[in-house]
Image: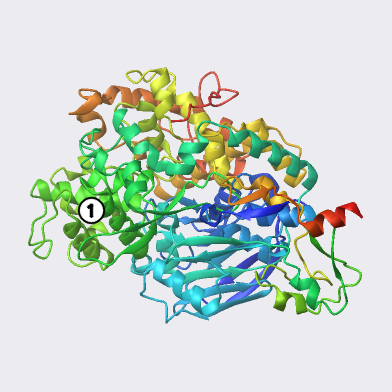
């Protein structure tokens, strides 16, 4: 499972940012979301959503081994281990890991798919595909 | 606070530069529901009745209401309020976008500006950092250009509201612009900002909004999302936004054309929604938390001019600056839309004023000499561009029109007031009410002048009979209670109007956010309190019986519709009088349109009754008393 981005469909409503923070922190706060929307206005006048692709670069650079891969391929932050050093933020190619002054750990997508449920323009779509060999192995363990 | 409020109110004294922080007055918000309600009460309480709207005693309020930013259908609105320089009464106007939610994320429910700054400034807010900063660099540049520049200077993640040269120069119908195309257009709120030398507000925040019962809210919103996705109106709204209705309005004889001379525009096919999507659309654009994305971000391509970007034209602008000016090319309409946005003019009043001037030119009341050698012909983009330049810089007769069509007609004379299409100084929106009498009554009685957002009855008139006026007043009263509630809560009304979310559902959301546990009827009563308070305020400032302010221009009853499906239709003066009689009766006001003590006391507005009595404009007691329930519940059909 992954999230497919149809970036031209994004209308910049930020419902995805809202639900992300609601789901994980029980607060309404787009600055606590693990995805972002880039708005390029007035020219050319486009929105572009950026989401975590679960590429794992954050886990590779984490000095504390605080980011691990779960059974469906998502990279998860261990809040106890994370020291909020920010190395993963620098390494993230999509710039979707963030810090918030309320928290002592980084905010990162955990593949919950809630953003895809509120998106009404199919800019973010839950996408089924054949799992990779690694994912299958992980599930079978 | 677990009630949707951010917790802090700022009072900014622009004269001294002092900024004070106060805990948000929760009791005030509970009683007046935020937004337009709190603004109405503060304007009533704090602005002296003889205060000049341009003077330091006028206050300018930004209010984010209760529900804005709170994960509900388009909880995106920001309400602005001050004494309107256009109507000289309570003024408020709102816009969508992202500013209001961002103010809450920075920790603020309300900004109250007093005084006048000695030099141009903008208010900078980054969470707890609140500063008045020098705006010399930005003064004089367009609204859209200013937003772009401020984002470059401060950061892309700031939400910004600006005014343009129109607001700086005191054009009475100046707007506030945000998000490259969202406007609080009506009642000259941008004019008041300009008079205070406040060029912009820039805000960024990263705080959380906490609500009473987030789980219940989340569950309710999830259900509403799934249900409204399947609503038949969703697809056209997402594709066209309000531009869908230009052709509908023309087909149903309410689209104003040529300064409201007629309601049939023969070239509608050149400016309708299909043209907009085919020739201008860049991307669909939504307000904060809205899955309906009615915003259409576009470009206007006109030979010999730079390609410009804008949002729209949405319905009102396509009507007031399109058919009403006789424009025959969607790119020209979009270009006028962009000019008005960047100059910082309300496109509804701006279109109305321009159309009025065009008719004056047609009739020979103003000439090429008056227009610096230019003509002002229907459909001419060059003429409109030059005319707007005269207006925004108040050059020559441009100064007359900068005061709106009512004041311009007073200067021009020759009976021109009969076709200055305004009520209380504010120009009509994009609907002609001659064959939609409820709509005409809505314009006549709206507390801020001829604006459609207080009550919109086209489909009511179609359902209840377009020739008759009986019974329409009670429905208008109800709509004037329910529709402004959205401006009070600072959310968008389109989910109610077009996607059939019920008032009960919205109040349920309100209760999930606030924990108030109120009913729809209680909310409607609050809205009626607000309506009566703004009426009292208007009478106290303008010192005459209410009825004299409630007449539309004579064209509305003297001229029948000359062409199209509404040919030969129109209300009579007797029907106009009858509608006013029925309206005042339905409100519990006397035949002069003055609120009675009985109705004001019933609404706990005893203080307003006392004030009206002191100046001799308290309504005479009604024999038999006032109706126990004012207004008749009605859900107008969507378009």
Q: Residue at x 38, y 31 (%)?
A: B439
Left/right placement of residue B10 relative to residue B244 reads: right
Identify the colour scheme used: rainbow
Left/right placement of residue B139 relative to residue B389 reads: right
The image shows a total of numbered marks equal to: 1
Q: Secondary structure at mark 1?
A: helix
Residue that label 1 marks? B408
Q: Is residue B295 visible?
A: yes
Left/right placement of residue B72 relative to residue B78 reads: right
Image-quadrant location for residue B446: top left
10 Å crowding of disc 1: few (<14), some (14-19), many (20+): many
Q: Position of residue B260 (x, y in %)?
A: 24, 38
Position above or below: B580 against B44: above
Position above or below: B539 against B455: below
Q: Residue at x 28, y 24 (%)?
A: B571
Q: Position of residue B185 (x, y in %)?
A: 41, 54
Q: Residue at x 43, y 66 (%)?
A: A42
Q: Nearer the viewer, residue B320 or A139?
A: A139
Image-quadrant location for residue B43: bottom right
Q: Nearer the viewer, residue B496 or B41?
A: B496
Q: Is residue A101 visible?
A: no
Image-quadrant location for residue B381: bottom left
- Quarter in which the N terminus of chain B is drawn: bottom right
Q: Position of residue A89 (x, y in %)?
A: 72, 75
Q: Position of residue B597 (x, y in %)?
A: 56, 34
Left/right placement of residue A35 relative to residue B13 reads: right
- Quarter in which the C terminus of chain B is drawn: top left
Q: Nearer the viewer, residue B495 or B594?
A: B495
Position above or below: B203 against A12: below
Provide the chain ID for the residue under circle 1. B
Q: Nearer the viewer, residue B499 or A35?
A: A35
Q: Residue at x 39, y 44 (%)?
A: B449
């Amino acid at each position: 499972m992954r999230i497919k981005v149809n970036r031209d469909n994004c209308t910049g409503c930020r419902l995805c940012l809202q639900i992300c923070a609601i789901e994980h922190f029980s607060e309404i706060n787009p600055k606590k979301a693990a995805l972002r929307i880039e708005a390029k206005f007035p020219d050319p006048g486009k929105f572009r959503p950026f989401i975590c692709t679960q590429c794992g670069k954050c886990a590779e650079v984490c000095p504390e081994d605080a980011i691990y891969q779960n059974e469906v391929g998502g990279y998860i932050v261990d809040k106890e281990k994370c020291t909020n050093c920010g190395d993963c933020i620098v390494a993230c190619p999509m710039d979707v890991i963030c810090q918030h002054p309320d928290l002592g750990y980084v905010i990162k997508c955990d593949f919950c798919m809630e953003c895809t449920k509120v998106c009404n323009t199919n800019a973010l779509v839950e996408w089924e595909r054949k799992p990779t060999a690694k994912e299958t192995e992980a599930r079978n363990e | 606070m677990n009630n949707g409020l951010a917790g802090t109110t700022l009072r900014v004294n622009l004269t001294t530069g002092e900024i004070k922080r106060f805990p948000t007055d929760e009791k005030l918000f509970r009683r007046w529901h935020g937004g337009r309600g709190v603004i109405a009460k503060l304007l009533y309480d704090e602005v002296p009745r003889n205060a000049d709207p341009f003077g330091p005693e006028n206050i300018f309020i930004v209010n984010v209401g209760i529900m804005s930013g709170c994960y509900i259908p388009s909880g995106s609105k920001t309400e602005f309020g001050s004494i309107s320089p256009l109507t000289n009464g309570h003024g408020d106007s709102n816009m969508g976008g992202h500013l209001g939610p961002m103010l809450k994320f920075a920790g603020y429910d309300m900004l109250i500006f007093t005084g006048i700054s000695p030099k141009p400034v903008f208010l900078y807010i980054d969470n707890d950092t609140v500063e008045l900063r020098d705006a010399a660099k930005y003064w004089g540049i367009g609204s859209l250009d200013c937003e772009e520049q401020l984002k470059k200077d401060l950061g892309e993640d700031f939400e910004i509201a600006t005014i343009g040269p129109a607001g700086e120069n005191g054009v009475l119908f100046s707007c506030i612009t945000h998000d490259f195309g969202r406007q609080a257009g009506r009642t000259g709120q941008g004019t008041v900002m300009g008079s205070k030398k406040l060029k912009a507000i820039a805000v960024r925040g990263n705080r959380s909004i906490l609500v009473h019962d987030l789980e219940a809210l989340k569950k309710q919103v999830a259900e509403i999302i799934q249900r409204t996705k399947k609503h038949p109106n969703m697809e056209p709204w997402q594709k066209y936004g309000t531009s869908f209705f230009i052709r509908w309005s023309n087909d149903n004889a309410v689209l104003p054309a040529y300064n409201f001379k007629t309601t049939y525009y023969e070239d509608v096919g050149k400016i309708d929604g299909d043209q907009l999507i085919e020739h201008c659309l860049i991307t669909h654009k939504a307000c904060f938390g809205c899955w309906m994305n009615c915003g259409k971000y576009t470009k206007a391509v006109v030979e010999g001019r730079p390609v410009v970007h804008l949002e729209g034209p949405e319905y009102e602008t396509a009507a007031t600056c399109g058919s009403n000016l006789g424009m025959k090319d969607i790119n020209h309409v979009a270009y006028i839309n962009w000019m008005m946005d960047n100059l910082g003019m309300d496109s509804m009043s701006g279109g109305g004023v321009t159309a009025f001037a065009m008719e004056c030119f047609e009739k020979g009341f103003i000439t090429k000499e008056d227009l610096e050698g230019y003509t002002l012909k229907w459909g001419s983009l060059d003429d409109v561009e030059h005319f707007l330049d005269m207006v925004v810089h108040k050059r020559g007769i441009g100064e007359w029109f900068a005061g709106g069509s009512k004041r311009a007609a007073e200067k021009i004379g020759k009976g021109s007031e009969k076709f200055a299409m305004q009520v209380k100084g504010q120009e009509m929106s994009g609907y002609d009410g001659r064959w939609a009498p409820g709509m005409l009554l809505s314009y006549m009685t709206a507390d801020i002048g001829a604006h459609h957002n207080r009550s919109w009855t086209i489909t009511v008139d179609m359902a209840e009979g377009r020739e008759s006026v009986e019974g329409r007043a009670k429905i208008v009263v109800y709509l004037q209670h329910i529709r402004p509630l959205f401006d009070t809560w600072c959310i968008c009304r389109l989910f109610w109007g077009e996607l059939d979310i019920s008032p009960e559902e919205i109040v349920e959301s309100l209760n999930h956010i606030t924990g108030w546990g109120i009913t729809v009827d209680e909310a409607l009563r609050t809205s009626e309190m607000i309506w009566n308070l703004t009426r009292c305020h208007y009478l106290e400032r303008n010192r005459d019986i209410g009825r004299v302010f409630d007449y539309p221009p004579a064209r509305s009853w003297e001229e029948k519709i000359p062409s199209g499906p509404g040919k030969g239709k129109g209300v009579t003066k007797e029907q106009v009088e009858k509608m006013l009689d029925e309206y005042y009766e339905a409100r519990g006001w006397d035949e002069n349109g003055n609120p009675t003590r009985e109705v004001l006391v019933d609404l706990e507005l005893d203080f307003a009754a006392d004030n009206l009595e002191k100046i001799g404009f308290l309504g005479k007691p009604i024999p038999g008393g006032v109706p126990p329930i004012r207004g008749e519940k009605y859900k107008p059909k969507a378009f």
